[in-house]
Every structure is written in C-alpha cells, then in structure tokens.
Amino acid sequence: MATYTGARTIDGIAVLADGAPLDPRTDLKRFTDRGFEWTYEGDEPAQLALALLAHHFNDDVKALSLCDVFMRRVVANLDNDWELNGTQIDSAVAELDGGSNP
C-alpha cells in the first residue's frame, strides 16, 4: 500500500505517492488545469481526491464515483502538510459509504 504526502514548499505544492509525483489523472476527469490543492472544497481539491482514489484503488470507476464526497469529507479537511496511507483511505471510504466499499 502506498503512502501519500502533500506539502506546501517554497517551489509550490508537492503531492507524492511513495516519493514519486502523483499523477493528477486528468485523463479520467479534468476538474482544473491548476494542479492540486486541499483544505477547502473546490476544483483543485477534487482533482487531488480523484488522483488519490484512482491510484489507491486502481479502479477508475470507483475513483470517479467517490471523488466528490472524498474531497468534501477528507481532502478539504487535510492540514497544510499531510500524510495518508492506504489503510487510512480505506477507513475513510468505509465511513463515507457505510462500509459497502472496502
């Protein structure tokens, strides 16, 4: 399971999956051309939610179906610098949908 990190750096925002840049997955859905963001609800946090879920689950349909609620409940509430692992994502998703999606 991957570990995801987000940080605000002097060079801008960095979001990594196991140390490598996270693909924004605009091939699935393009919410924005402005990259990732978090700590609020909007297009850039939605792109981050989609990218995290698509990478974690390796299931594009599942990622698309969950990205809006995941953005509102998880990504919008992340700290300026954050770390999430696969277990935390699984737990958050289980809480979002009543446990029907592992």
Image (cartoon, helix red, strand yellow):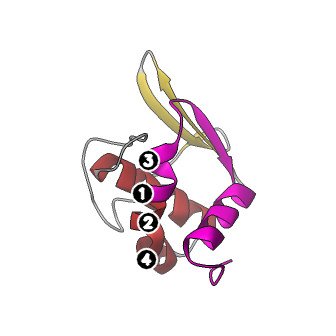
Residue 7, relative to residue 33: is it above or below?
above
Closer to the N terminus: mark 3 or mark 4? 4
Q: Secondary structure at mark 4?
A: helix
State the CA–CA distance, disc 4 to disc 2.
9 Å
Residue at the top extreme, as displayed: 10
In the rendered structure, are the residues bearing label 1 and label 4 in contact, judged by CB atoms less than 8 Å apart? no
Indicate the amino acid at tag 3.
Ala
The secondary element bearing badge 1 is classed as: helix
Decide whether residue 86 is among the magenta residues: yes
- Disc 3, disc 1: CB below 8 Å? yes
Q: Position of residue 91 (x, y in %)?
A: 69, 64
Task: Name the residue rendered at 52%, 41% in the picture.
Answer: 78
> Where residue 14 appears, x then y in whole percent?
49, 32
As drawn, the label of residue 72 is 1
Q: Which numbered marker is on residue 69? A: 2
In space, the residues marked 3 and 4 are separated at their CA atoms by: 17 Å
What residue sits 32% from the left and 47% below the top?
Answer: 44
How packed is label 1: few (under 14 Cα within 10 Å), some, or many (20 or more)? Answer: some
Q: Which residues are magenta?
A: 73-102
Q: Residue at x 52, y 53 (%)?
A: 74
Q: CA distance from mark 1 to mark 2?
A: 5 Å
Task: Choose the circle earlier in sequence order: 1 or 4.
Answer: 4
Front tag of 1 and 4: 1
Residue type at numbered disc 1: Arg
Query: Which mark sits nearer the N-terminus, 2 or 3?
Result: 2
Task: Say whether residue 22 is left or right of residue 35.
Answer: right
Q: Amino acid at mark 4?
A: Ser
